[in-house]
Amino acid sequence: MLIQLSVYGCVESNSSFVGNMKIAHVTCVYPPYRGGIGNTVKDYTEGLRSKGEDVHVFTPNYKRALSWGNAAFMPSLLWRLKGFDIIHLHYPFYGGAFFAALASTIWKTPLVVTYHMRTEASGWLGFIFKAYRVLLEPYIFGDAQLILASSIDYADSVGLESYPVSAQAFSVDAERFIPGNQDALREELGISPESCSFIFVGGLDDAHYFKGLGELLKSASKLPKDEAWDLIVVGGGNLLASFEKQAEDLHLGDRVHFLGRVSDEDLPRTYQAADVHVLPSINQSEAFGLVTLEAAASGLPSLVSDLPGVRTLVEPEKTGLVVGLNDVAAWTRAMQRVIVNGQERRSWGANARSMALEAYDGKTLIQQLILSYKSLKVGGSYEDWDNQ
C-alpha cells in the first residue's frame, strides 16, 4: 500500500515493509504527471519493491514548494534523506539535485545518478542551464559513486566520460504492450485499412518542445498527395492548439488525428491502431525514447532522429530507420519508404518486438540495477546483501 506524505513541499511515497536496502529515489516528476522520467522512477519503484527492497520516492509537491515548471527549491531533502542506504537521484532536477548530492555528502550515503537528458534552451533560460552545468554539475556528478545512462553513446555525447558511468537501459512492459489490430479505432478515426498509419506519442507542452512534431508535420506535408497515410498524435499540453493550426495550415487536417492525452489503459490499443512509430526529436533533450520501446513491444517499426541514445533503439534496415537530425527532406523520404513497402515495415515490426523482449525486459534490468546498488560500499559493510 502506498502512503502519501506531504512535508516541507515534498511528497514522499513509501512502502509499508522493510526490505534488504532502504533506497531513496529523488525525482522532479512522478505519475500521474506524464513523462519519461516519472514513468522510469515508477517502474524502478515497483520493480525494486517486488524484489523486497524498501523504496521511498521524493518528488516536489508543486502546490506548496517554491517552483517554476518542473524545477523546485527543495532544501528539505537535506534532512529527509537521512538514514538511507542509497540515494538515487534522477537528473535533471533543478532545485533538488544539489540538495540530494549535499545530503549524500552529509550523511555519507552513496549517491547514484540516472542521467535522463541534457536540457537545451535558447535565450536567458539557456544561459541558466549553461551556468548550472558549469557551477553545480561538477559537484553533483563528482559526488556520485555511480552515474547511470541509458547508453554509453549518450553518456559520451554529453561529456560524462570522466565520471563513473555505467549503461542502464530503460525497460518496457512487453506483456502490456503487445501486437494487435485495432481496426475499430482506425475506423473511428476515419483511417482506411489501406492507409499506413504513423503514431507520434509525446508531451505537447513547453517542457517537451524538443519532440519535433512541428518538423514532422512539415515533412508529412511534402509526401505525394496520392499516397495513403495518416498520423495519430497522442499527447496534450499548451502547444496542442498551435500544432492543430499548423496541420490545418499545411492542409493535413483530414490526415492528422489529434487524440490529446490518452489514458495509460488505452495507450496499448492506440499503438495497435498504427503501423509505424515516429520520434522526430530535434536535440539532445531527447536521450532515449521510452515510447520507441513501447512501440517496439507493440510490434511497430520506428523512424527516429539521429540522436545519441535515441538511435541505439533502432537497428537500421531491421527494426526501422534512423533519420537525419532536423532534415525535413530526409524525414519525407523515410516516411515515403515505409508507406510504399508494407511487407518491409511488417517484417521490421516483428523484429522490433523480438528486440524488446530480448534486450529490454524489465525483470532483468531491475536485477541489474540491484547489482549496481550492491556494488557500492555502504557504511563499511555490504557483504550481507551479497549473501541474500
Image: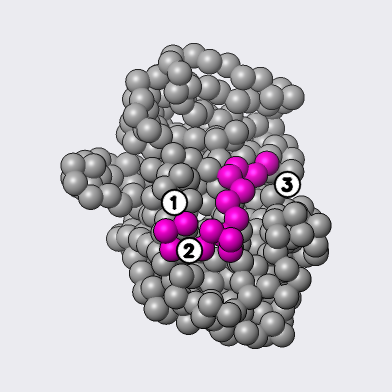
State the residue position of label 2: 251
Residue found 81% across the figure and 57% down from its top:
184
Residue type, label 2: His
Q: Which quarter of the figure is the C terminus placed in?
A: top right
Residue type, label 3: Asp
Whether pointer 3 and pointer 2 mark residues with C-beta atoms closer than 8 Å, the reply is no
Residue found 74% across the figure and 43% down from its top:
265
Q: Which residues are magenta?
A: 248-263
Which type of secondary structure does the marked residue at label 3 adopt? loop
Q: How is the image coloured?
A: one colour
Residue 168: image location, x then y, percent: 54, 57
State the residue position of label 1: 245
- Closer to the chain start, of discs 3 and 1, is 1
The answer to whether residue 26 shows anywhere in this view is yes
State the residue position of label 3: 266
Question: In the figure, is residue 11 to the left or right of 180?
Answer: left
Residue 227: image location, x then y, percent: 59, 79
Instruction: Find residue 185 and name its label.
Output: none
Residue 246: image location, x then y, percent: 42, 56
Which type of secondary structure does the marked residue at label 1 adopt? helix
Q: Which quarter of the figure is the N terminus placed in?
A: top right
Picture layout, residue 354 above or below residue 126: below
Magenta-span inclusion, residue 258: yes
Q: Residues within 10 Å of mark 2 (few under 14, many from 20)?
A: few
Picture layout, residue 18 above or below residue 369: above
- Closer to viewer: mark 3 or mark 1: 1
Q: Residues within 10 Å of mark 1 (few under 14, many from 20)?
A: few
